[in-house]
Image (spheres, coloured by chain):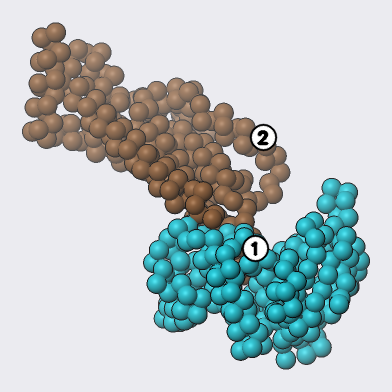
Amino acid sequence: MQSIIDGFTNAFRLIIHLNPELLRIILLSLQVSGTALVLATLLGVPAGAGLALRRIPLKGLVIIGLNVGMGLPPVVAGLFLYLFLSRSGPLGCFGLLYSPTAMIMAQTILAFPIVASIAHAAIVGVDPVIRQAALTLGATPFQESLTVIQEARYSIMAGVLAGLGRVMAEVGAIIIVGGNIAGYTRVMTTTIALETDKGNFELAIALGLILLTISLAVTMALRFFQRLGKTEAGENLWA
Amino acid sequence: MGLELEISGISKNYNGAAILRDCSFAFEAGRTYALQGPNGSGKSTLWRILALLEKPDQGLVRYRQNGRVLPMDLDLRRRITLVLPRTGIFNATVFKNVAYGLKIRGVSRAEIDARVNEVLAVVGLDRKKFQRAGELSSGETKRLGIARAMTIEPEVLFLDEPTANIDPANTEIIEDLILKMRQESKTTILLITHDPAQAERLGDQLLFMRAGQLLAA
């Protein structure tokens, strides 16, 4: 029990004193996950919109593929990306293995199906009368699509936050392709795994508390957007 | 010279059932037509086809100006509009809803402000312009739909049951708006209504739908 109390006390000390190593790890985590999330959003929202609004061959299969991708085990994603990025792999010539870029790629692969699937479901859920209203007012097909995406914005935002939750908590893929190199590819989750293994609990607990805080913030933001969507786009909208 | 609309031999089927059968008519520019008919007789389908939202299975829809048939392009689509029976308001303020048609046409901010404020005053929603459109009453929502159409100053305006399910006060306001448009602009108005008295009040010519066939009075 004393070791737990000591662990928490030292962890709080690290946070309060803004320990440089702690800050560097948090910053890299946010940089990697943030970049991955931006990429997943830039790719996932148009992909979800395209599936929802356009006639695409094998659409059903693509949607099933995305839904399967939502539950893709991170270690499997990491393994396949490792095979592609390793020296003998098709992308080996770029020398990306064990770099933050490889970690961003891994997390983008994990977040993309979540963002795309939720964006697809959100856009399909927009009342068809919205599309018709846009058309009757003279919208081009592109403007019509933008209007529908805008109507689904709160649900899409929830999808992006769900993607953020997935990548921030992820450890399996980035440890495989990032290598957990101190000061270069070591992020919050991989540090927690390593430090726990070494019995070095204060840094692990400090990072765990930071992760929990981020998770709480993501959950609250998710609830906020869901409630905003319900009150603004709910039943009273179509009165 | 305004837009003239002519249809010939329009037919439409849904799931094997004939909704429209060989509908033909010539609509003159600047007149108001009131279409009546029982539910399911094909009125809304015909209006959607004429407003270029749907294609007929058979027959032709032709818009003419100065005797020339116009191509069915975006330019033509932007000269006509249909106010849907369910307005389909955007999740935004009343002002943004009414400004939508001008915004997608690339009209300047100053022009949008002036035009939208003017139309909102005409339809009596100027005091609610910063309110979320979803908070409006049924009657106000119908007026919002008409305001959106008025803002873009269409040459042909289709109205699909503009006063259905609203109170007499709002019905009167909407009828006055339609009469005002009829008198002050050269807009051709094509109106669907279930109220024979309203059809008489607003229409220059009455039309009827019976089992998918269009009949003129």
* Residue A107 versus residue B182 in the image, above or below: above
Chain that the image shows in brown = A
Query: Which residue is painted at 70% across and 74% down in the image?
Result: B198
Element under disc 2: helix
Whether residue A201 appears in this view of the structure is yes
Q: Depth check: B129 or A54 in front?
A: B129
Q: From the viewer's perspective, tell me whether residue B144 is left or right of residue B65.
A: left
- Chain designation of label 1: B
Disc marking residue B164: 1
* Residue B26 versus residue B82 in the image, above or below: below
Are tags 2 and 1 found on a single chain?
A: no
Quadrant in which residue A157 is drawn: top left
Disc marking residue A196: none
Q: Depth check: B76 or A65 in front?
A: B76
Chain that the image shows in cyan = B
Query: Which residue is painted at 49% across and 71% down in the image?
Result: B99
Q: Amino acid at mark 2?
A: Leu
Quadrant in which residue B127 is drawn: bottom left
The percent coordinates of residue A58 (x first, y second) are 70, 39
- Tag in front: 2 or 1: 1
The quarter of the rendered structure image containing the N terminus of chain A is: top left
Whether residue B101 appears in this view of the structure is no
Residue denoted by label 2: A61
Query: Which residue is painted at 13% across and 17% down in the image?
Result: A7
Q: From the viewer's perspective, tell me whether residue B184 is left or right of residue A232.
A: right
Q: Amino acid at mark 1?
A: Ala
